Amino acid sequence: MAKDVTDSKGGPAHVAIIMDGNGRWAQQRGRPRLFGHHAGAKRVREIVAACPDLGVKYLTIFAFSTENWKRTQSEVAGLMRLFRRYIEREAMALIEDGVRVRFIGDRIKLDEKLVSLMDNLELATAHNDKVHLTIALNYGGRDEVTRAAQLMALEIEQGRLSHKEVDAETLSRFLDTRFLPDPDLVIRTSGEARISNFLLWQSAYAEYEFVDTLWPDFTAGEFGEILAGFGGRERRFGAATV
């Protein structure tokens, strides 16, 4: 299993964010939901840029879940256009800022142009190491574990893996996040207090922070305040207090 990588100052090295509240933010302003999603995409830029100074090496954001396909066809289509536009517009800045970008989730339902843009951005940023930005797109925790179990079963079926070798560490190697340490902190914006099928396996010992702020209003300043408070938490990973 991935090791804890909390930074030397006591802050979280890996932060995962459920970016919730775009639609409500737009509705409060009498605008369509997609207006809020565009505002939320701009907020991502600010939070990513703040990570180096805040000591965050790994940032994982929940962009689109396996359940989000249930939304209206127009909203889903608009989100897919937004994802393509975000990659096209932000690619050069991400490369120049030393951000390594990777995507997790099942790409099978995504259109070919979007997948091609994702592949190209991953390749173009492969040597960057200032911030590791992971974008969960068509991602669901249960779906990820199911796919990992299927891959592991295939390895056993083909004789490349023994069932006796299967343990938590083995399963972790088949997850989408096999290249990442487990998150230290998971933040959800918009006042909802649920995890919505996000990083279920990886967040077993993560700290959680639920904030009322809608994602488009979530500033780097508020992000920094949450991270500052993290250092005061005692993480025992199941061990008893001495």
Image: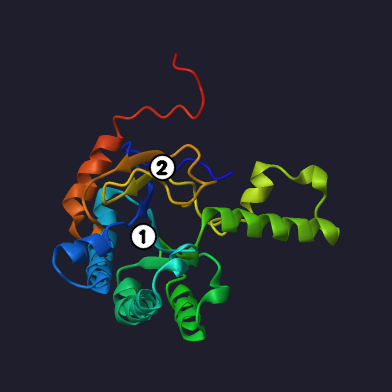
Pick out the residue farthest to the bottom: 113
Q: Which residue type does callout 1 highlight?
A: Val
Q: Could you tell me how many numbered marks the image carries?
A: 2
Residue pointed to by mark 2: 184
- Can you say which quadrant of the picture contains the C terminus? top left
Residue 194 x, y percent position in the rendering: 39, 45
Q: Which residue type does callout 2 highlight?
A: Asp
* Residue 10 sits in quarter: top left
Q: What residue is at 37 percent from the left and 27 percent from the top?
A: 234
Residue 90 x, y percent position in the rendering: 30, 76
SS class, disc 1 = strand
- Can you say which quadrant of the picture contains the N terminus? top right
Most foreground residue, 137 or 15:
137
Residue pointed to by mark 1: 131
| Nearer the camera: disc 1 or disc 2 | 2
Most foreground residue, 165 or 193:
193
SS class, disc 2 = loop
Q: What residue is at 54 percent from the left and 72 percent from the top?
A: 107
* Residue 148 sits in quarter: bottom right
Residue 5 x, y percent position in the rendering: 44, 43
Q: What residue is at 81 percent from the left and 47 percent from the top?
A: 163
Pick out the residue farthest to the top: 242
* Residue 9 sits in quarter: top left
Q: Is 108 displayed left or right of 25 in the figure?
A: right
76, above or below 8, in the image: below
Most foreground residue, 68 or 64:
68
Q: Earlier in the sequence, mark 1 or mark 2?
A: 1
Badge 1 density bin: few <14, some 14–19, many ≥20, Cα 10 Å: many
Q: CA distance from mark 1 to mark 2?
A: 15 Å
For the residues bearing labels 1 and 2, Cβ distance under 8 angstroms? no
Which mark, by number, is residue 233?
Answer: none
Q: Would residue 49 be visible to someone looking at this image?
A: no
